[in-house]
Amino acid sequence: MLTLPSAVQVYIASEPIDLRRGFDGLAAATREVIRQDPLSGHLFCWLNRRRNRIKILVWDRTGYLLVYKRLERGTFTLPKAPLIGARHIEVDAAELTMILEGIDLRRATRQRRWYRAAKPIPRSTATFG
């Protein structure tokens, strides 16, 4: 189970990659395919062609961390298709956790939530002159 802050961004490459690549190979692919800095602290996810294995690359201030998961049955399902011209999709930390647990997010629905509206800034009655 991964515990991630909500501010972390998660990028999943839409193209399969040879998962025999290690830290440096995935970091180079992050620069070339996803076009992000692998030292940013965000998570970069890579799937194999059969989508039954995933590698997650992240920089944690002192070095790279690599998480590798293999499914014994089934496949990982991306929640949406990438935008035209994009080679990756962005998901949040909660969605990544559900993907790793095998939940198909294409069929899941997100409930509308209440958010507090921003308070209007009161106008000053003072005049400057």
Image (spheres, helix red, strand yellow):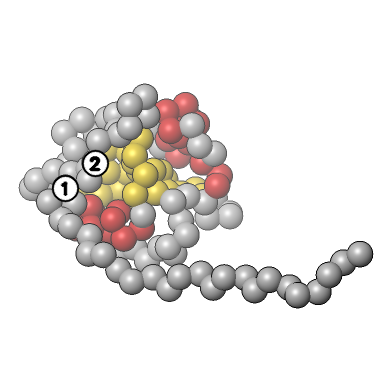
Q: Residues under labels 2 and 1: Cα distance?
A: 7 Å
In the picture, the quarter occupied by the C terminus is: bottom right
Q: Which amino acid type is marked by label 1? A: Arg
Q: Is residue 99 visible?
A: yes
Residue density around tag 2, few if under 14, some if 14–19, many if 20 or more, within 10 Å: few
Kindly identify the residue that appears in the image at 54 percent across and 39 percent down.
37
Q: Is residue 93 left or right of residue 101?
A: right
Where is 5 relative to 69, above or below?
below
Kindly identify the residue that appears in the image at 42 percent across and 62 percent down.
6
Kindly identify the residue that appears in the image at 42 percent across and 28 percent down.
33
Where is 39 relative to 33, above or below?
below
> Could you tell me residue 127's position as x and y percent?
83, 70
Towards the viewer: 114 or 90: 114
Towards the viewer: 20 or 13: 13
Towards the viewer: 86 or 45: 86
> Could you tell me residue 48's position as x and y percent?
24, 34
Q: Earlier in the sequence, mark 2 or mark 1?
A: 2
Q: Cβ–Cβ below 8 Å for labels 2 and 1?
A: yes
> Could you tell me residue 53's position as x and y percent?
22, 42
Check disc 2 and report its element: helix, strand or loop. Answer: loop
In the picture, the quarter occupied by the N terminus is: bottom left
Q: Is residue 56 left or right of residue 111?
A: right
Residue density around tag 1, few if under 14, some if 14–19, many if 20 or more, within 10 Å: few
Q: Which amino acid type is marked by label 2? A: Lys
Which numbered dot is residue 106? Answer: 1
The residue carrying mark 2 is 80
Kindly identify the residue that appears in the image at 58 percent across and 55 percent down.
61
Q: Is residue 104 visible?
A: no
Q: Is residue 2 left or right of residue 72?
A: right
> Could you tell me residue 102's position as x and y percent?
16, 54
